[in-house]
Image (tube, grey):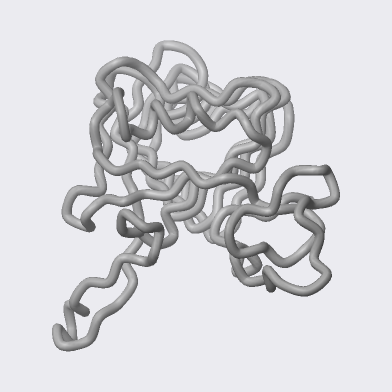
Amino acid sequence: MALLAGSPAIDAGFSTGTIPASDQRGFARVGQADIGALEAGPVLLVDNSSDSGAGSLREALANATTPGSRILFNLPSGNSRIVLSSGHLDVPGGRTILLDASRLVDGSGAPRLEPDPVRPTNLVEVGGVTIDANANSRGFSLSAGGTLSAHTVTVTNGQVPGNGGGIFTAGTLNLIASTISDNAAKRGGGISSLQGALTLVDSTVSGNSAGELG
């Protein structure tokens, strides 16, 4: 089983000795090896909160063609909201993507450290990214055969006339420490999962509305 976003096994292995250069599937070990038979995959960095274009989340999702691709966020904690203006974010079938906002990073991929609000002299890791659908679309659409694992992501302000105001999934969706809130649809105000698999771990679905069928 591939590692989920935020797994402590990511980048926690040894890169020396007898460890093979590729994982069990033949995919290359990237940088510091992960613990386990399956490597999490290459890293794509989101370094702005634009809806589209270079460095955007939309571009990173489009470029995440290698199974197990991991998307990290180089965003300041005060600007960690991405407002969608050109429709939902798409995860096609055949993709396996880890969307990891459990800790924001700097340009090198190292954890971003900021002053602790309680003890400003202490530096702490910060995390969390909000996807704001701008009441014009849903946040994500996941096609059959696709897999999306999202860690510390909030999807909000989605609105569609059909199914899945926050997320529509026909694939495999794993939400970890995430929130789906204040979305609206005819059916499945927060999430519509008609087939595939849906797993929520330490996550919240609240404040969503639907005309019928939840």
Q: Which residue is at 35% across, 58% downward?
A: 104
Quarter assignment of residue 193 = top right
Quarter assignment of residue 135 = top left
The foreground one among 137 and 25 is 25
Q: Which residue is at 65% across, 51% downward?
A: 40
Q: Which residue is at 62% across, 53% downward?
A: 30
For the question of whether residue 103 can be seen, the reply is yes
For the image shown, how many numbered marks are present on the structure? 0
Give coordinates of residue 152: x percent, y percent.
44, 55
Residue 154 lies, with reference to residue 17, above or below; the image says above
Q: Residue furthest front?
A: 17
Quarter assignment of residue 148 = top right
Residue 11 lies, with reference to residue 180, above or below; the image says below
Q: Residue furthest top?
A: 161
The foreground one among 50 and 130 is 50
Give coordinates of residue 146: x percent, y percent.
67, 28
Give coordinates of residue 82: x percent, y percent.
27, 37
Give coordinates of residue 211: x percent, y percent.
44, 20
The foreground one among 52 and 127 is 52
For the question of whether residue 189 can be seen, the reply is no
Q: Is residue 29 left or right of residue 204?
A: right
Q: Is residue 10 left or right of residue 137?
A: right
Q: Which residue is at 68% across, 36% downward?
A: 67
